[in-house]
Image (spheres, rainbow, N blue to C red):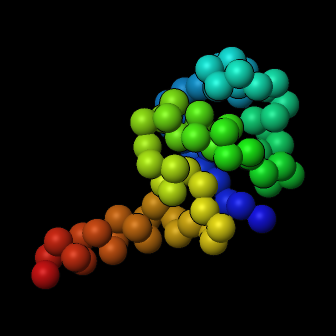
Amino acid sequence: MIHNRVKLLRTERGLSRKDLADAVGVNFQTIGYLERGDYNASLELAFKIADYFELPIDMVFSPRPFKSMAEELAELKAKAAK
């Protein structure tokens, strides 16, 4: 399974599933399947989504579960404090 942050990124930007689907050239149901983990994006679609959000692909998709944003921010603050 490939984990993703598609729903988080989409909702953070106030986009509907249809908005994102239209932007990357897929059916809106595909976005729903991705968000629920019922479908893994093709490499091409993964790059399109990452490009749309202007993020490196590994910030959107990962073979391992993502840490929560709170955990990641805490780690960044701890590193910056050193």
Does residue 36 show up?
A: no
The C terminus lies in which quarter of the figure?
A: bottom left
Q: Nearer the viewer, residue 22 or 35?
A: 22
Give the quadrant of residue 49. top right
Residue 29, position as x, y percentages in the image = 84, 31
Residue 3, position as x, y percentages in the image = 68, 60
Q: Is residue 75 above or below residue 5?
A: below
Residue 50, position as x, y percentages in the image = 53, 40
Q: Is residue 73 above or below residue 20?
A: below
Tally the numbered discs.
Answer: 0
- Is 70 situated left or right of 73 in this image? right
Residue 62, position as x, y percentages in the image = 60, 62
Residue at the image position 59 percent from the left and 25 percent from the top? 15
Residue at the image position 62 percent from the left and 20 percent from the top? 23
Residue farthest front in this picture = 44
Q: Is residue 34 above or below residue 48?
A: below
Residue at the image position 75 percent from the left and 35 percent from the top? 31
Give the quadrant of residue 9. top right
Q: Is residue 44 above or below residue 61?
A: above
Q: Nearer the viewer, residue 52 or 78?
A: 52
- Is 8 situated left or right of 76 in this image? right
Q: Nearer the viewer, residue 60 or 71?
A: 60
Residue at the image position 81 percent from the left and 35 percent from the top? 30
Q: Nearer the viewer, residue 34 or 57?
A: 57
Residue farthest left in this picture = 82
The N terminus lies in which quarter of the figure?
A: bottom right
